Amino acid sequence: MSSHLLYQIALTLVPNIGDVQAKILVQHFGDAPSVFKSKKTELEKIEGIGSVRARSIKSFADFKTIEKEIAFIEKYKIKPLFLTDDAYPKRLLNCYDSPTILFYKGEADLNASKVISIVGTRSHTEYGKSFTEKLIKDLANENIIIVSGLAFGIDSIAHKSSVKNNIPTVGVVGHGLDKIYPSENVVLAKDMIKHGGGLLSEFFSGTKPDKHNFPLRNRIVAGISDATIVVETNSKGGSMITAKLADAYNRDVFAVPGRVNDKSSSGCNHLIKYNKAILLTDADELLEVMGWKEQVKNKKPLQQRELFIEMTTEEKQVVNLLQEKEFVHIDEINIRSGLTSSSVAAAILNLELQGVVQSLPGKLYKLS
């Protein structure tokens, strides 16, 4: 049993310690074991922790619950993703309330260069169903991962269409991975994993799909992707919460327009009317807005520019990282460069002004 994993999970169970405080503690001490091994007086001095939370950490002793969870993880080959792990979804790190740990069953790369979430009402119409199916079919060759919530309606349609078109699809659930809710989606969930997708949850095994879990699930759906697409929803639907969260996380939000007297589209029409979402009618519009239209790239001009551009040490570090991949997320640049976030921001700005670096939606960057 990994002692690191033991303490990582323990951090999520300490009373009075939420995701925000957990992130503060890990940033201060470097890892979870060091948090628990630190002195109470040292904990008390950390901003946002104080004496009450420090006492909660030092008195925590419920390790039997954790050992049981680790046994479940190992038995069913579930991947625990702690916020400092390389495989943890980097886009979520931009969200102040990102989960401390996630439990993942699947193979899809959660840090893929293109990730979109598709959400909508459980009571969909034929219009919503056909639009979702066509949109996904038209995205089949774009190397996009599709995320949704494995609920009835548009969520299930998005997952089924993704499997049908060989697109990896990830279902974010509001319960433990020892069950599937709704139970009618058990076969679908297995198909998703079998075809290179997966299931993702922040909840322990045994956690029931209680109503209050789903807004928490929605923040992951919104934060893990570059853009959220709302296909159909009424003005008070759960998808409106996801859209609001995506907007708050500085993600692009798209909405499919519907008839003005159609309740199933009232939420989408509202988002479009008040400039909370971009009107979406087809896959080409999505690709265009997101900057994902395939273009013929000529690397030679960049190589020529590099010969004449004098770069600082920090700028060279950023460029070297960007040369390794087609797209790199800002969090990965911050972590791997070893520079302060302000130094990275300054370097990227200068490189953008010189035409060396290009920014993309979702805080991704690439060489021009």
Image: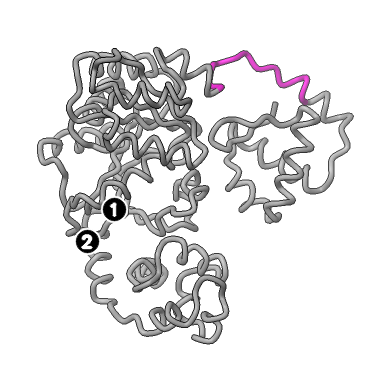
Q: Position of residue 287 (x, y in %)?
A: 49, 18
Give the answer, above or below, for where 21 lies relative to 173: below
> Counting other residues with Cα less than 10 Å from the Cα at mark 1, is it few (<14), some (14-19), or many (20 or more)?
some
Q: Amino acid at mark 1?
A: Ile
Nearer-N-terminus badge (2/1): 2
Q: Residue at x 55, y 16 (%)?
A: 294
Q: Secondary structure at mark 2?
A: helix
The residue range painted magenta reads 291-302
Could you say which is closer to the camera, residue 213 or residue 353? Answer: 213
Is 368 placed left or right of 92 in the picture?
A: right
Q: Position of residue 53 (x, y in %)?
A: 43, 77
Give the answer, above or below, for where 145 lies relative to 222: above
Q: Amino acid at mark 2?
A: Phe
Q: Are marks 2 and 1 in contact (CB under 8 Å)?
A: yes
Q: Look at the image and say whether residue 282 sits in the magenta stretch.
A: no
Is 139 placed left or right of 74 in the picture?
A: right
Q: Residue at x 35, y 27 (%)?
A: 230
Q: Secondary structure at mark 1?
A: loop
User: Which residue is tagged 2?
Assistant: 72
Q: Quadrant of residue 127?
A: top left
Give the answer, above or below, for where 63 lies relative to 323: below
User: Which residue is tagged 1?
Assistant: 78
Q: Position of residue 208 (x, y in %)?
A: 16, 54
Quadrant, the N terminus = bottom left
Quadrant, the C terminus = top right
Q: Residue at x 56, y 31 (%)?
A: 361
Q: Residue at x 37, y 25 (%)?
A: 270
Say if residue 143 shows up in the picture. no
